């Protein structure tokens, strides 16, 4: 007996089963419900709403939060989120209430609780943590309407500030992110005012995180951390930071360090030189790093700067040589002023020429009044001393740490930890991808904007955990999957895997369910995910 068309339902799953499985493996729904509470009369709990928002956020389609309900139309919503849950239950009102509850509880507290629990379940090493921040611009005014809103503790001020997105015309908020060196897993997230300064907050964030969550880690940050006030606050913590080259001591070290001080690093293409330094009343190790790749790039940039500055200097010299001076001293002073402004060139063969000229027309009479003025004549030459300094600095930067024992943290380890700082930068690139659902923030209140930013962080957490787990499973099994070019890889991106799972459907015929389009390639990939992921494709 064949089934009636009315008894047959075809719903999309695509890669959402993988995302849902990772959420289940990290017990996301249970964690959120434990923090925010649940009510027995709720059709869909706060945890299930957050899971739904993550499915939406990692859907990689043009369906942001204001199309939240529509995103789930045609999808196997009940299969992915729980029995009795349908797209109409995921409406704007329910979404908004959950965002408000998240904000009221504390966005950082929610995120860190979920992230640390997930990191422990997935065996993420938390020996080193990398802190950075970035700005996210918003569309809209976002002006606080009442004095009560202004005075409310923890209220996020969406305002103008230094834009990393190069959109100074738009208001923004700041996102602070701390990731582990193991798998780029985000473990800390904080939403801050749009005009907040990194250097003013980094040390406080690290100290608060250590005190509140009891993690004895090595904290790594960029040059924004390296101020006297910050280092004083971090006396009891272990840290690695880049040293700003604007510091006088840093300039002197980079300019005067001898070639013989450098030794080859265990990292190919690097040389390092270590010395002790006493800055901010703290004894620390300073490590000069020279990157061969960066040196070649810096030297090319230096050539371009020399050419550009020479062209500009030639124009200025031409204008100066046409200028008339009342006396020889004025001409000499003008030449000196120009010389002081030239960073990599200098005026040489400077001559002051006396010019005699009568003001009348035609041939001057014997008693005609002759006016006298002076003009400069000079040529441009490279300022070799300054150029040599630039060549010596090329490819070099300066790191510092308060871990003095090289047996505990070697010079190479300091460099390795700083290079892992790219983990947070990769996280920000992910969050700012145009395919991500918050590429243009649109919510109608600062609280909900901040809460949606925390959801963005949870999306990054789920994605990073899934990618790390997949790569580890491939490595353990000594197996590979095909990449975009059809070549085997043991380090695929999770985004590519998501693309491989397009057009997978859940077909329901009466009480029977089956998955369609689950090819042998897709079946092979699912072998390297946990049982919580495979169950959504009816493989467990």
Image (cartoon, grey):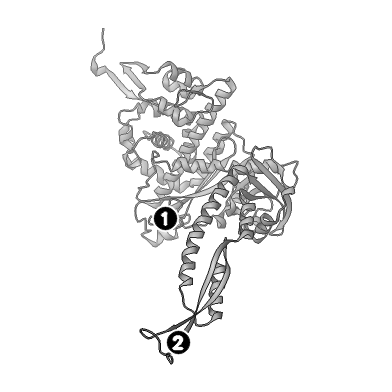
Q: Nearer the viewer, mark 1 or mark 2?
A: 2
Q: Position of residue 231 (x, y in %)?
A: 65, 55
Q: Nearer the viewer, residue 104 or 286?
A: 286
- Image quadrant where one finds the N terminus: top left
Q: Where does label 2 land, which residue?
A: 370
Q: Where does label 1 land, which residue?
A: 158
Q: Nearer the viewer, residue 364 or 115?
A: 364
Q: Along the horizontal axis of the image, is 509 left or right of 171? A: left
**N-term-proximal mark, 1 vs 2:** 1
Is there any visible trace of residue 216 in the rendered image?
no
Specify the farthest residue to the top. 1
Q: 29 above or below 192? A: above
Q: In which quarter of the view is residue 468 placed?
A: top right
Q: Residue at x 54, y 69 (%)?
A: 378
Q: 222 above or below 486? A: below
Q: Along the horizontal axis of the image, is 538 left or right of 213? A: left
* Helix, strand or loop at mark 2: strand
Q: In which quarter of the view is residue 145 placed?
A: bottom left
Q: 133 above or below 53? A: below
Q: Nearer the viewer, residue 47 or 223?
A: 223
Q: Position of residue 18 (x, y in %)?
A: 45, 27
Is there any visible trace of residue 485 in the rendered image?
yes
Q: Nearer the viewer, residue 181 or 51?
A: 181
């Amino acid at each position: 007996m064949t089934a009636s068309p009315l008894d047959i339902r075809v719903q999309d799953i695509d890669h959402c089963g993988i995302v849902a499985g990772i959420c289940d493996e990290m017990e996301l729904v249970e964690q959120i419900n434990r923090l925010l509470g649940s009510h027995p009369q709720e059709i869909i709990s706060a945890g299930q709403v957050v899971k739904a928002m993550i499915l939406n956020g990692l859907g990689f389609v043009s369906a942001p939060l204001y199309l939240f309900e529509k995103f789930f139309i045609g999808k196997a919503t009940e299969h992915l989120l729980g029995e009795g849950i349908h797209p109409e239950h995921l409406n704007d009102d329910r979404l908004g209430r959950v965002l408000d509850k998240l904000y009221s509880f504390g966005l950082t507290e929610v995120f860190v609780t979920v992230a640390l629990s997930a990191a422990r379940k997935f065996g993420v090493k938390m020996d080193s943590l990398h802190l950075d921040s970035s700005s996210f611009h918003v569309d809209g005014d976002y002006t606080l309407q009442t004095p009560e809103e202004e005075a409310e503790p923890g209220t996020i001020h969406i305002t103008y500030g230094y834009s990393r997105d190069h959109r100074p015309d738009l208001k923004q908020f700041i996102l602070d992110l701390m990731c582990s060196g193991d798998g780029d897993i985000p473990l800390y997230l904080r939403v801050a005012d749009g005009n907040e300064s990194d250097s003013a907050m980094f040390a406080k964030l690290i100290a608060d995180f250590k005190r509140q969550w009891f993690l004895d880690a090595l904290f790594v940050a960029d040059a924004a951390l390296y101020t006297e006030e910050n280092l004083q606050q971090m006396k009891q913590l272990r840290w690695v930071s880049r040293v700003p080259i604007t510091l006088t001591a840093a300039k002197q070290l980079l300019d005067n360090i001898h070639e013989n001080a450098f030794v080859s690093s265990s990292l190919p293409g690097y040389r390092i030189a270590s010395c002790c330094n006493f800055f901010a009343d703290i004894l620390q190790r300073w490590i000069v790093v020279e990157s061969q790749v960066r040196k070649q790039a810096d030297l090319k940039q230096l050539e371009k700067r020399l050419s550009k500055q020479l062209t500009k200097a030639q124009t200025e010299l031409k204008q100066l040589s046409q200028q008339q001076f009342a006396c020889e001293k004025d001409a000499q002073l003008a030449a000196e002023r120009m010389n002081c402004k030239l960073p990599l060139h200098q005026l040489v063969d400077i001559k002051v020429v006396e010019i005699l000229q009568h003001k009348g027309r035609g041939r001057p009479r014997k008693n005609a009044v002759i006016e006298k003025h002076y003009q400069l004549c000079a040529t441009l030459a490279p300022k070799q001393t300054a150029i040599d300094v630039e060549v010596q600095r090329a490819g070099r930067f300066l790191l510092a740490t308060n871990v003095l024992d090289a047996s505990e943290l070697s010079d190479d380890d300091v460099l390795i930890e700083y290079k892992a700082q790219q983990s947070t930068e990769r996280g920000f690139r992910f969050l700012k991808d145009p395919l991500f659902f918050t590429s243009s923030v649109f919510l109608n209140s600062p609280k909900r904007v901040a809460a949606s930013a925390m959801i963005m962080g949870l999306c990054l957490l789920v994605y990073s955990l899934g990618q790390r787990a997949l790569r580890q499973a491939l490595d353990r099994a000594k197996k590979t999957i095909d990449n975009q070019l059809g070549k085997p890889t043991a380090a695929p991106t999770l985004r590519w895997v998501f693309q491989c799972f397009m057009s997978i459907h859940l077909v329901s015929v009466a009480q029977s369910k089956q998955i369609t389009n689950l090819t042998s390639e897709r079946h092979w990939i699912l072998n390297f995910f946990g049982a919580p992921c495979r169950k959504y494709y009816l493989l467990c």
